[in-house]
Amino acid sequence: HQEFINNHPYAYLAWYNLGQAFSSIGEYEKAIDALEYSFLINEFFEMGYRDCADICMQIQNHPKALQVLYDIISKFGVDEETLVSISECHIQLNQYFQAKKILIKAVKLDPYNDETYYLLGQCFSKEEKWHYAINAYKRALDLEDRREEFHAGLAEAYIKTNNLKAAQSHL
């Protein structure tokens, strides 16, 4: 890849492939740099943006992930998947109000996404708004009842509200 890029420095797919190669061997910072080159060369190369954001989230670089995710929205429009990723970053940065605001937009785009309700439950749990958390976790479980983290979140919320019998069934 390096040799090809040296000869063709504006080949955005070569930079993208280099980013994938770095990612596969655990060189995540180098992968991010290469992926950034891919979409700097071709500003409409959506896959480069998305893969870059995914790696940033994977290595817990949430500020950088947010920057790339907001770029995705500005270039390609709003979609529920990107909004969920943005809210995950805000949650990791303890910005629960912002995360909830974005999750409400995501619910309007897709009211059947279990992950959206789970993340709302996470926000409410972090804010110790247990009854709201219970409602959000229940909605997530209504949509997908086989996710352990959904049951664990609901169990914790029930424990915090002293409803141990309900908590036990989810544990």
Image: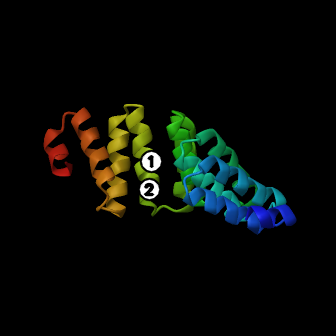
Q: Secondary structure at mark 2?
A: helix
Which label belongs to residue 158? none
Q: Residue at x 15, y 46 (%)?
A: 168
Which quarter of the picture shows residue 23? bottom right
Q: Residue furthest front?
A: 3
94 to 2, vertically: above or below: above
56 to 15, vertically: above or below: above
170 to 92, vertically: above or below: below
* Dot 1 and dot 2 residues touching (CB under 8 Å): yes
At label 2, which amino acid type do we have? Glu
Residue 53 percent location from the top left of the image = 62, 52
Residue 111 percent location from the top left of the image = 48, 61
Where is the N terminus found, in terms of image quarters? bottom right
Q: Could one spot residue 78 in this view of the protein? A: no
At label 1, which amino acid type do we have? Leu
Q: Is residue 10 left or right of residue 77?
A: right
Residue at the disc numbered 1: 119
Residue 113 percent location from the top left of the image = 46, 61
Q: Residue at x 37, y 31 (%)?
A: 128
Total marks shown come to 2
Q: Is residue 22 left or right of residue 35?
A: left
Q: Secondary structure at mark 1?
A: helix
Residues at marks 1 and 2, CA–CA distance in whole angstroms: 6 Å
Disc 2 crowd rating (10 Å Cα; few below 14, some 14-19, many 20+) is many
Residue at the disc numbered 2: 115
Q: Residue at x 19, y 44 (%)?
A: 167
Closest to the observer, 72 or 56: 56
